[in-house]
Image: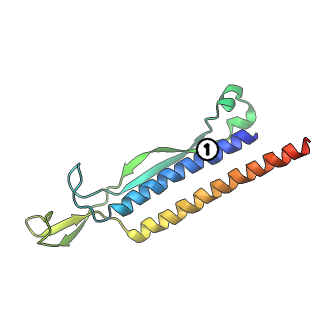
Amino acid sequence: MDFMTALDIGASGLSAERTHLNIISMNLANAKTTRTAEGGAYRRRTVVKAATDVDSPFAKAMQDAQTRELKGVRVLGIARDERPGKRVYEPGHPDADQEGYVTYPDINVVEEMTNMLTATRSYEANVSSIQSVKSMWNKALEIGR
């Protein structure tokens, strides 16, 4: 594996975790949103990620045995959670139904914060791997002097 491929793998992880953090932030920001443009309460969103081949142009051109086995991370899409909303009795709320219940998104703040910590740690691990590759690159350049 060459240095550029290692950087591509780390960069794919950074990109996926950035998307994950953005979605978590959106969920937290809309935890009490009862009305959206689509109608109804906000629906929690999740990121669908999968391991994929690294999309390095150099690796595609060379297609050697080492780079064929390398994997990275790719965001396949953003999925809407199908959990039913929480019904809360608030007859004075403008979005209350005829019975006086308001449907709030089923977003657990503790769960979202835990997901945020996990995504942050994954992001930090990818940054650390990129820093290690940069350090190895610099040491290789020093050896060549």
> Residue visible at 43% across and 59% down?
24
- 134 over 57 or under it: above or below: below
Depth check, front residue: 145 or 78: 145
Left or right for 144, reference 78 = right
- Residue tagged by mark 1? 72
Say if residue 1 shows up in the picture: no
Quadrant housing residue 120: bottom right
For this view, does 90 lie left or right of residue 28? left
Query: Residue placed farthest to the top in the image?
Result: 61
Q: Quadrant of residue 145?
A: top right
Quadrant (top left/top right/bottom left/bottom right) for the N terminus: top right
Residue name at image x 28 percent, y 57 percent? 42
Task: Tell me residue 69's x, y (percent).
Answer: 68, 39
Q: Position of residue 108 (x, y in %)?
A: 37, 68
The answer to whether residue 72 shows anywhere in this view is yes
Does residue 127 sit above or below 74 in this rendering?
below
Q: Amino acid at mark 1?
A: Gly
